Amino acid sequence: MISTFYQPYRDKIQQQIDQSAKPVLHLSIHSFTPIWNGVERDVDIGILFDPNRTLEKEYCEQLKLTFEKKLPNQSIKLNEPYKGTDDGFTTWLRKRYPDKEYAGIELEVNQKYATHLSSIQQEIFEAIEASLK
């Protein structure tokens, strides 16, 4: 499985970063379980980043404001439900590219929206698009 799916994905992303004009904004979108260890999480969309990387921090602060405008009834949080510096692909890539060349952002969407993602999907896309302007 790792050699069939995971490694080719990682290799392709790194190749695209190498060949792209800099800076590169890498958005990785995931979902998370709404209940962890019996406790309901109080976040709808989490924006994960490394707060020590200026490009990531500035972009994520803007993205959060944009999400809050598009989705005023949702709980939008920075570095929740996980820390943006936890081990993962974006963390690994940050070690290979300097701050001014690479921004690795993870969006975490609460799985409670899995059955009706369309109710917020368009707003998510619009917020991402608006944050890039």
Image (cartoon, rainbow, N blue to C red):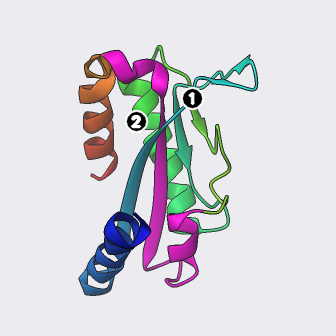
Asked if the magenta segment contains residue 128, the reply would be no
Q: Is residue 101 magenta?
A: yes
User: In the rendered image, which residue does mark 2 sit on?
Assistant: 66
Say which of marks 1 and 2 sits in front.
1
Position of residue 60 relative to residue 33, above or below, is below
Q: In the image, residue 111 lies at what x, y percent? A: 47, 26
Where residue 41 appears, as percent x and y from the top left, is: 66, 23
Name the residue nearer the viewer: 4 or 78: 4
Give the left or right position of residue 122, taking residue 14 as reference.
Answer: left
Residue 36 makes an appearance in the image: yes
The quadrant holding residue 52 is bottom right
Residues under labels 1 and 2: Cα distance? 24 Å
Q: Is residue 37 above or below residue 130?
A: above
Say which mark, if any, is on residue 33.
Answer: 1
Q: Amino acid at mark 2?
A: Thr
- Residue 63 falls left or right of residue 53: left
- Left or right of 25? Residue 41 is right
> How many numbered badges does the structure rendering display?
2
Secondary element at image label 1: loop
Task: Provide the residue span drawn in magenta.
Answer: 88-115
Residue 121 position (above or below residue 74):
below
Q: Secondary structure at mark 2?
A: helix
Of residues 93 and 60, the one nearer the viewer is 93
- Residue at 32 percent of width and 73 percent of height: 8
- Give the amino acid type for the residue marked by disc 1 in the picture: Thr
Tell which residue pokes out farthest to the front in this image.
Answer: 1
